[in-house]
Amino acid sequence: PSYELKHPGDIPPIRYLINGNPNSFKSGGEANVYKAYDMHLNRYTAFKRKAHYSNATLNTAIQEGRINAKLEHPHIQRVYQLVKSQTSPPVRMLYDREENEMISTQWIDGPSGLDLLKKAIETGEGLAPTLICKIATEIGSAISYAHAQGTIHCNITLPNILLRASDYHSFLV
């Protein structure tokens, strides 16, 4: 993506460009995750938006974002920013005119733990024991770190484990 600027050092007025069409997001049980482009830093990011909003879920989303933003670990997905769409100039949603609060996070280009398991079952190939041990060790390290910081993850499931496509480096979401 690009934005036409007068000078190479200019910063675009729109920070995040989010393509909200159905082919550019992953849907989970509680949230939809859109792939967005950070126009200021020239990188992809993920925008997590609660699928169903109420005051309670909104407060939970904000609290979750703030807690996760404090955690810095190589196997925990980084939180970048809390953003409100449509009323906040830095965000431009394409194909979507709803106003919602979102959490900007690290984009991880790869399957979830559930996707990996489904593929292994469908193909009949199974999963290599070394890969299972690698993922378990990495996620265990992330959980241990979070607990040491006073944070308890209440939903450790295969969909909340993301794997980088290039090397299966795992992240707890």
Image (cartoon, helix red, strand yellow):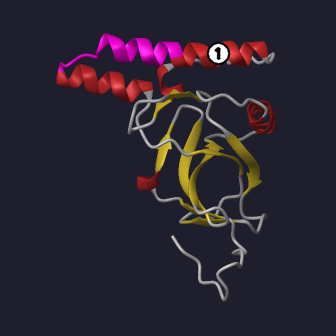
> Is the residue 11 above or below the residue 167 in the image?
below
Task: Please report the residue visible at 57 percent of the width from the left and 13 percent of the height from the top.
Answer: 140
Residue that mark 1 sits on: 143
Task: Categorize mark 1 by other alpha carbons within 10 Å: few (<14), some (14-19), many (20+).
Answer: many
Q: Residue 107 in the image: x percent, y percent?
A: 55, 45
Q: Position of residue 143 (x, y in %)?
A: 64, 15
Which range of residues does the magenta coloring cover? 124-137
Q: Going by the picture, which residue comes out furthest to the front? A: 9
Q: Secondary structure at mark 1?
A: helix
Residue 152 visible? The answer is no
Residue 147 part of the magenta segment: no
At label 1, which amino acid type do we have?
Ile
The image position of residue 7, as x and y in percent, is 67, 86
* Predominant SS of the magenta segment: helix
In this picture, residue 119 sits left or right of residue 47 = left
For the C terminus, give its image quadrant. Answer: top right
- What is the number of callouts on the image? 1
Residue 25 higher or lower than 156, as above or below: below
Front residue of 5/173: it is 5
Q: Name the residue rendered at 24%, 16% in the picture.
A: 126
Left or right of 159 on screen, residue 75 = right
**Residue 54 placement: quadrant:** top right
Outermost residue toward the left in this view: 124
- Residue positioned 28% across, 27% down in the render: 119
